[in-house]
Image: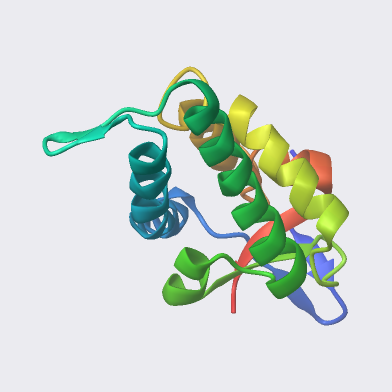
Amino acid sequence: MNDPILHENYTLAGVGVGLRLAAIIIDGLIFLPVSYLVAAIFGTAASDGFVLQGFGFYLTLLLSFAYYIYFEGVIGSTIGKMIIGLKVVKTDGSPCDLKAATIRTIARMIDGLPFAYILGAIMVWTSVNKQRIGDRLADTVVVRK
């Protein structure tokens, strides 16, 4: 295992699964109306719910990727992370950039395996710096603000 990440005179302590999960749930609740709107526009929404398929599914996936890349790469936090008080930074303490945010976002597909981010959670639990695969590939860590 790696040693904790040091930045000047303090440690960039990564946060665990619980706080990350809370942020993901908030982001999901924020994104749910967007998904419903896309489904409604493409005719896959009904009074009892909606199904994303075909073009609507791919559009929602693209919008979701754009959400994470923009908020983490430009602002440093998604809305969920902001509410919980978390921020994505590079392991040297510098702000997350668009390249790192893109790598993190693409790696979510791997971290989400086999379901419900189990692989990502295992990676966080077994990492001294509490990094999922996306964090390791992008050289980032999620910290408290």
In the figure, residue 41 lies in which quadrant? Answer: top left
Q: Residue at x 55, y 34 (%)?
A: 120
Residue 15: x and y, percent? 54, 59
Residue closest to the eye, 132 or 3 = 132
In the image: residue 55, left or right of residue 4? left
Residue closest to the eye, 131 or 10 = 131
Q: Residue at x 61, y 49 (%)?
A: 130
Residue 21: x and y, percent? 40, 50
Residue closest to the eye, 99 or 19 = 99
Quarter of the picture holding the C terminus: bottom right
Position of residue 82 relative to residue 14, above or below, is: below
In the image: residue 102, left or right of residue 32? right
Q: Residue at x 79, y 64 (%)?
A: 96
Q: Residue at x 69, y 70 (%)?
A: 76
The figure's colour scheme reads rainbow
Quarter of the picture holding the N terminus: top right
Residue 31: x and y, percent? 42, 54
